[in-house]
């Protein structure tokens, strides 16, 4: 968990429950809260001019949702959409800033977390420019596994459907399915009960 729940609550955070397809915030809206996922999954997405969905990330328990926007005066460049019943902690921007001012170590931890997230995001985006489907898919898998405490081979259950992988890589679903099967033959990942383990 990025910030301990008790600390967030002590600074005035509220516990909010959401359901599939709920919108936490829309692209173009102004950031007013720090959100941290207690349980559930949230996708960050954008629709291009043709209406095609591009998924930028799928966030799970313990992660924050677009916290970097609280450090600048910009609107959200993405939508945050709930994928499954979820519980989030919500803390106002003013109280979030006060918490950071009063807790230097939390501030440093957030800086470290943001730096790591940015680093892995850059690597993923570099991989997404590849013409090779396996490089794109492995880039997304590495990015999501980077948030897991368990880094051994096949220990990470990928929280993405084949369709979501396609939306994150710009590949067709059929290409994703075929490439995942090839990656399994190459022992890069395992498939158990239709779930991908990386």
Image (cartoon, rainbow, N blue to C red):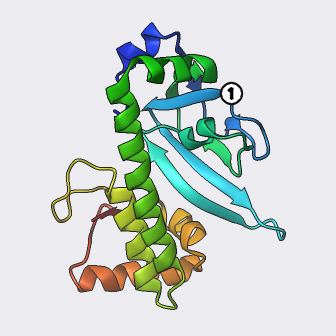
Which one is nearer the viewer's eye here, 154 or 59?
A: 59
Q: Residue furthest right?
A: 49
Residue 33 position, x and y percent, is 62, 26
Residue 61 position, x and y percent, is 40, 37
Q: Residue at x 71, y 57 (%)?
A: 46
Q: Can the viewer see residue 78?
A: yes
Q: Is residue 32 above or below residue 125?
A: above
Q: Residue at x 40, y 84 (%)?
A: 134
Q: How many marks?
A: 1
Q: Can the viewer see residue 83?
A: no
Which one is nearer the viewer's eye here, 53 or 185?
A: 53
Q: Is residue 92 left or right of residue 146?
A: right
Neighbours of disc 1 within 10 Å: few (<14), some (14-19), many (20+): some
Residue 106 position, x and y percent, is 36, 28
Q: Is residue 70 above or below residue 144?
A: above
Q: Which residue is mark 1?
A: 32
Which one is nearer the viewer's eye here, 76 or 47?
A: 76
Q: Residue at x 53, y 55 (%)?
A: 57
Q: Residue at x 52, y 17 (%)?
A: 98
Disc 1 is placed on an element classified as loop
Residue 90 position, x and y percent, is 56, 22
């Amino acid at each position: 968990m990025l910030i301990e729940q008790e600390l967030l609550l002590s600074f005035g955070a509220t516990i909010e429950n959401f359901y599939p397809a709920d919108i936490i915030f829309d692209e173009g809206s102004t950031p007013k809260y720090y959100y941290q996922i207690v349980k559930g999954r949230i996708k960050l997405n954008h629709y291009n001019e043709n209406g095609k969905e591009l998924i930028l990330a799928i966030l799970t328990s313990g992660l924050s949702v677009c916290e970097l926007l609280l450090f600048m005066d910009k609107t959200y460049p993405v939508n945050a959409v709930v994928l499954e019943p979820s519980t989030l902690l919500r803390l106002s921007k003013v109280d979030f800033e006060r918490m950071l001012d009063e807790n230097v170590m939390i501030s440093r931890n957030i800086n470290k977390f943001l730096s790591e997230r940015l680093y892995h995001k850059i690597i993923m985006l570099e991989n997404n420019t590849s013409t090779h489907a396996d490089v794109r898919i492995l880039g997304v898998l590495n990015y999501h596994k980077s948030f897991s405490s368990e880094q051994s081979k096949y220990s990470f259950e990928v929280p993405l459907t084949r369709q979501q992988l396609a939306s994150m890589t710009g590949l067709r679903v059929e290409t994703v399915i075929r490439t995942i099967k090839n990656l399994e033959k190459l022992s890069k990942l395992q498939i158990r009960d239709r779930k991908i383990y990386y």
